[in-house]
């Protein structure tokens, strides 16, 4: 997909007419949906994307604010001639989906946010200081994460991914391969370095009520309460959700329950 300043890698398939766009989080790429995509393809037109800076997408030095990355998604929809789409997003991808829905609510049929607090909410400030999210501050530091992880990618990504939930070994192998590229690694850390701006952008967005339907799903093995539903209810007209039997890597470790929640939600919107 080409726009003025960035090319995005995407993979598309499915027999349905209604589009569903899948956005990955950190430190993953579009392949993190490998267990979910085939299940959705039976009923939907499914598009999985490598975010700006990641995998086979372009890696510009700037533009990792979620407001900006949401514009990448809008450009993708324009390129594919999609008027409206469901957006299903995990981790930092969920922050992009949230920014998209606020900026272009008429283009989103719904958004599904999976296991990530939205910057600008009270729960974001609580979770970012929790021990399980130690990496938020580390990744935001200038140059330090690159200096300490370069050449030690296998140890770092294996340790991190196993520390927040069970995950398939193939996902770890894919992550090590993808993020051993220095430009991709820096792009990934830039996602965290932009959080301060994301907080300010979302606080401005949330002065208005979001009318796009929201499904909020989180894994119960790290935070066993529906933090997405609780934190977004004051700002969202229609939000529903559930705590799933999983750690953080829900699309990988519990795709059955995830798809079981997605199908009725997507079908009614």
Image (tube, grey):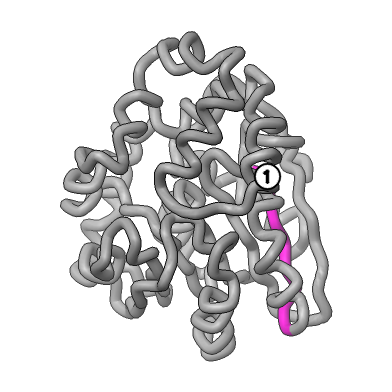
Magenta stretch in the rendered image: 43-50
Q: Nearer the viewer, residue 145 or 100?
A: 145
Residue occupied by mark 1: 50
Rendered residue at 34%/24% (across/down): 138
Tell me where residue 47 appears, x and y as whole percent.
72, 61
Decide which of 21, 152 is in the foreground and name it.
Answer: 152
| Residue 112 % position (x, y) | 47, 68
Is most of the magenta stretch helix, strand or loop?
strand
Residue 255 vs 194, above or below: the answer is: below
Label 1 sits on a secondary structure element that is: loop
Quadrant housing residue 35: bottom right
> Does the segment drawn in magenta span residue 83?
no
Q: Residue at x 47, y 27 (%)?
A: 190
**From where the camera sits, is residue 107 visible?**
no
Vertical placement of residue 205 versus 172, above or below: below
In the displayed structure, would residue 266 be above or below residue 78?
Answer: below
Residue 22, image x and y in percent? 62, 60
- Residue 101 appears left or right of 187: left
Decide if residue 227 is on the left or right side of residue 39: left
Picture quarter containing residue 144?
top left
Q: Residue 55: x, y in percent?
A: 71, 36
Task: Tell me where residue 150 sits by quadrant.
Answer: top right
Compare residues 191 and 5 and report the one nearer the observer: 191
């Amino acid at each position: 997909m080409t726009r003025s300043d960035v090319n995005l890698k995407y993979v598309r398939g499915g027999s349905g007419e209604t589009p569903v766009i899948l956005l990955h989080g950190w430190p993953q790429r579009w392949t993190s949906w490998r267990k979910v995509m085939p299940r959705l393809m039976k009923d939907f037109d499914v598009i999985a994307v490598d975010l700006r800076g990641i995998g086979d997408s372009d890696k510009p030095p700037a533009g990792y604010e979620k407001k900006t990355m949401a514009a990448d998604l809008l450009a993708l929809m324009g390129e594919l001639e999609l008027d409206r789409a469901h957006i299903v997003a995990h981790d930092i991808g969920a922050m992009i989906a949230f920014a998209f829905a606020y900026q272009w609510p008429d283009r989103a049929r719904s958004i599904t946010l999976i296991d990530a607090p939205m910057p600008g909410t009270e729960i974001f400030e609580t979770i970012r200081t929790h021990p399980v999210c130690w990496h938020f501050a580390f990744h935001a530091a200038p140059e330090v994460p690159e200096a300490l992880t370069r050449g030690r990618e296998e140890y770092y990504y294996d340790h991190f991914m196993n520390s927040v939930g069970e995950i398939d070994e193939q996902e770890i192998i894919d992550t090590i391969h993808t993020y051993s590229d220095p430009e991709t690694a820096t792009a990934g850390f830039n996602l965290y370095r932009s959080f301060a701006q994301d907080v300010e952008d979302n606080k401005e967005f949330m002065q208005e009520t979001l009318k796009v339907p929201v499904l909020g799903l989180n894994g119960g093995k790290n935070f066993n309460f529906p933090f997405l539903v609780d934190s977004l209810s004051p700002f969202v007209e229609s939000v529903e959700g559930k705590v799933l039997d999983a750690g953080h890597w829900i699309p990988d470790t519990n795709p059955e329950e995830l798809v079981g929640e997605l199908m009725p939600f997507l079908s009614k919107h």
